[in-house]
Image (cartoon, rainbow, N blue to C red):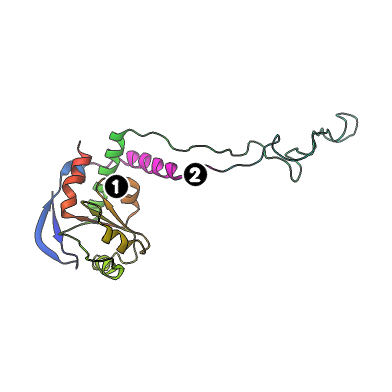
Amino acid sequence: MEIEIYSTDGKATGKKAKLSDAVFAIEPNDHAIWLDVKQHLANKRQGTHKTLEKSEVSGSTKKLHRQKGTGGSRKGSIKNPLFKGGARIFGPKPRDYSFKLNKKVKDLARRSALSHKIKDGSIKVLDGVSLGAPKTKEYVSILRSFELGTRRSILVVPAKDEMLILSSRNIPGARVVTATELNTYDIMNANGLLIVKDAIAPLEAILTK
């Protein structure tokens, strides 16, 4: 598969980039995408939620009245969950929500997500991106060239570039990642992906091992 290469001003350079069909043109597996996104969101959960159960609530453990003969319901202590200020029945406890997902499934999910985006025309290949100093204004102008000024976007670079990272961090929805950091959630959540030409080879190498 070949795709047009663009400059940072959004104009076609006349050159073509060759993309691997094994990464960008597979039959997408939506279930693998769902599993990978589910794992990503689960791993982000803190799991620190906690409520007090009966043994943890402050209060007397004395039985409020005798079991039978009062005409009312049976009651234990004032810590009964049915009373105001009482405990909670089967309340949440701190837990770890993360779970394991096989690497092959995660790679399939990323390939499927990229294949979806290439079909939608949401992926653009750039000849190169470089900033001499952190300039948010210059980064915004690049995004606007591809109609991504106020939309969620990802720039995939071959290696970590501090200037690009600093230039993008104050822009809502804009991210700069390397090929190894790109994940299924970010791909599916983005309105557009800008991939630097030199980042294609490492990205394909990771996903076709």
Magenta segment = 27-48
Residue type, label 1: Glu
Q: Is residue 40 magenta?
A: yes
Q: For residue 46, which numbered disc appears in the image? A: 2
- The secondary structure making up most of the magenta span is helix
Residue 66 image position (x, y, % from top left): 88, 30
Residue 45 image position (x, y, % from top left): 47, 44
The foreground one among 33 and 136 is 136
Residue type, label 2: Gln
Give the residue displayed 70% in from the left and 34% down from the top: 55
The foreground one among 91 and 188 is 91
Helix, strand or loop at label 2? It is loop
Give the residue displayed 88% in from the left and 29% down from the top: 68
Residue 107 against residue 129 in the figure, above or below = above
Give the residue displayed 31% in from the left and 38% down from the top: 106
Badge 2 density bin: few <14, some 14–19, many ≥20, Cα 10 Å:
few
Q: Label 1, on which residue?
A: 181
User: Residue 157 is drawn in which quadrant?
Assistant: bottom left
Q: Is residue 159 left or right of residue 89?
A: left
Farthest residue, direction right:
69
Residue 55 against residue 155 in the figure, above or below = above
